[in-house]
Image (cartoon, rainbow, N blue to C red):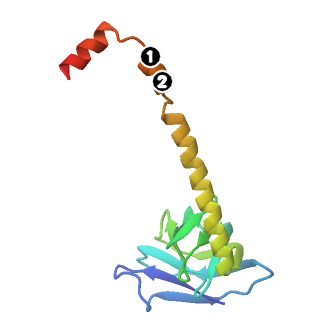
Amino acid sequence: MKTILYYDLGYGLNEKDVIESIVTFDRDRFSVTYDLTGIQGIQGVRWNFVKGHFSEVKIDNIDYENRIELLPGGMRIEKDDRTTIFFTTDAFYYVNAWDWKNPGKLTIEGRIRFLNEQDIEEIMVEEQEKRKSLDEKKTHKSVPVVDHEVQEKRPIGKKEKIKAVLK
């Protein structure tokens, strides 16, 4: 499968400033290396790892000379700090490096699971249930339960009478 690494030399990301690589999968695992050596003036990098498929990607390792992180883009759910479920067929990562002054080789290793429509539907239902559960917990914690019968039977004090008159 073809993957593309776009690098921005100050003119924005474009089809001219790219490095293409063919990725082979060993079961669901992949490893891809891009050689950025000698490319000067890099201001930003984006990695388009798969095109035409919904996917769940887990990044196991990133090897680069400087500190680097991958920031997922596109419609997605971040399952945990290393796993992203992409609900787009044009999924990508921004490659955020501490310093692009002397670029070298960038290797990304991980796992990928291609998703079909049924997988997507199941994931969406799970997410809706999680959010509904979280919303219910928030509602129960923040909204006090008032027993209106008890409140009505309680005699009104002087302060409450004054507040009622002032209203």
The residue at the point 53 percent across, 41 percent down is: 138
Outermost residue, right side: 27
Place residue 108 in its image quadrant. Answer: bottom right
Place residue 87 in its image quadrant. Answer: bottom right
Q: Is residue 62 left or right of residue 40?
A: right
The residue at the point 51 percent across, 30 percent down is: 145
Q: Is residue 44 above or below residue 167?
A: below
Residue 27 percent location from the top left of the image = 80, 81
Count of picture labels:
2
The residue lying toward the viewer, choosing from 105 and 4, is: 4
* Residue 60 - label: none
User: Badge 1 local density, few (<14 within 10 Å), some, or many (20+)?
Assistant: few
One can see residue 129 in this view: yes
Residue 53 percent location from the top left of the image = 62, 84
User: Badge 2 local density, few (<14 within 10 Å), some, or many (20+)?
Assistant: few
Q: Say which element carries label 2.
A: helix
The residue at the point 66 percent across, 90 percent down is: 1
Q: Is residue 160 left or right of residue 14?
A: left
Q: Say which element carries label 1.
A: helix
The residue lying toward the viewer, choosing from 166 and 94, is: 166
Q: Quadrant of the C terminus?
A: top left
Q: Which residue is mark 2?
A: 149
Q: Is residue 138 above or below residue 155?
A: below
- Specify the amino acid type for callout 1: Lys
Q: Are marks 2 and 1 in contact (CB under 8 Å)?
A: yes
The residue at the point 63 percent across, 74 percent down is: 120
One can see residue 82 in this view: no
Place residue 4 in its image quadrant. Answer: bottom right
C-alpha separation, residue under disc 2 versus residue under disc 1 = 6 Å
- Specify the amino acid type for callout 2: Glu
* Residue 153 - label: 1
